[in-house]
Amino acid sequence: MTIVEDARVITGGVDTHAGLHVAAALDPLGGLLGVQEFPATAAGYARLLDWLGGFGTVALVGVEGTGSYGAGLARHLAAAGVPVVEVDRADRQDRHRQGKSDPLLRREVARSEWLCRLEVRLMPKT
């Protein structure tokens, strides 16, 4: 008897910056598979997508700032056929009080992951 495994479907969340992007990958149950930094360049976008794809089939990626720092990445993902959703930035007051610190960054990446999972659940099955 042959056992066939279904490909794992994953979601991604990306916190964008001028020089680098921080990506997180989630499994279908919302478990964090990994967090990795990538340069905000065409080569970095390709590496980010390859990294996410290493965990399974990429169903959706939430990107912060698709109209600014995340615009190039959003275009790259869309051109590769990956659905992209915009993720809001942290509250201005939180950013001002806490800065773009690692704890705030991790919280925002986690938030974008959660939004990705929510979006996947709301997408109609085809």
Image (cartoon, rainbow, N blue to C red):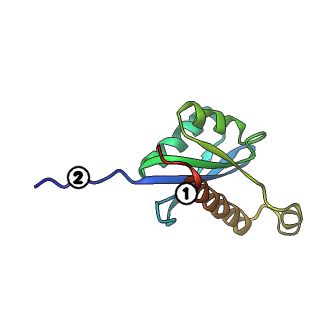
Could you say which is closer to the camera, residue 27 or residue 95? 27
Where 78 falls versus 38 (above or below)? above
Element carrying mark 1: helix
From mark 2 to mark 1, how far is it between C-alphas? 24 Å
Q: Which residue is mark 2?
A: 4
Residue visible at 71% across and 42% down in the picture? 70
Say how many tags the image has.
Answer: 2
First along the sequence among labels 2 and 1: 2
Q: Quarter holding the N terminus?
A: bottom left
| Circle 1 residues within 10 Å: few <14, some 14–19, many ≥20 | few
Where 106 falls versus 1 (above or below)? below
Q: Amino acid at mark 1?
A: Arg
Furthest residue toward top: 79
> Where residue 4 sits: x, y (%)?
23, 52
Residue visible at 89% across and 65% down in the picture? 93
Residue visible at 52% across and 42% down in the picture? 49
Q: Which residue is mark 1?
A: 121
> Where residue 56 sits: x, y (%)?
41, 50
Furthest residue toward left: 1
Where 43 falls versus 14 (above or below)? above
**Marks 2 & 1, CB-CB < 8 Å contact:** no
Q: Amino acid at mark 2?
A: Val
> Where residue 7 sits: x, y (%)?
35, 50
Where 107 falls versus 57 (above or below)? below
| Circle 2 residues within 10 Å: few <14, some 14–19, many ≥20 | few
> Where residue 54 sits: x, y (%)?
42, 48
Left or right: 8, with 47 as reference point:
left
Q: Which mark is residue 43?
A: none
Element carrying mark 2: loop
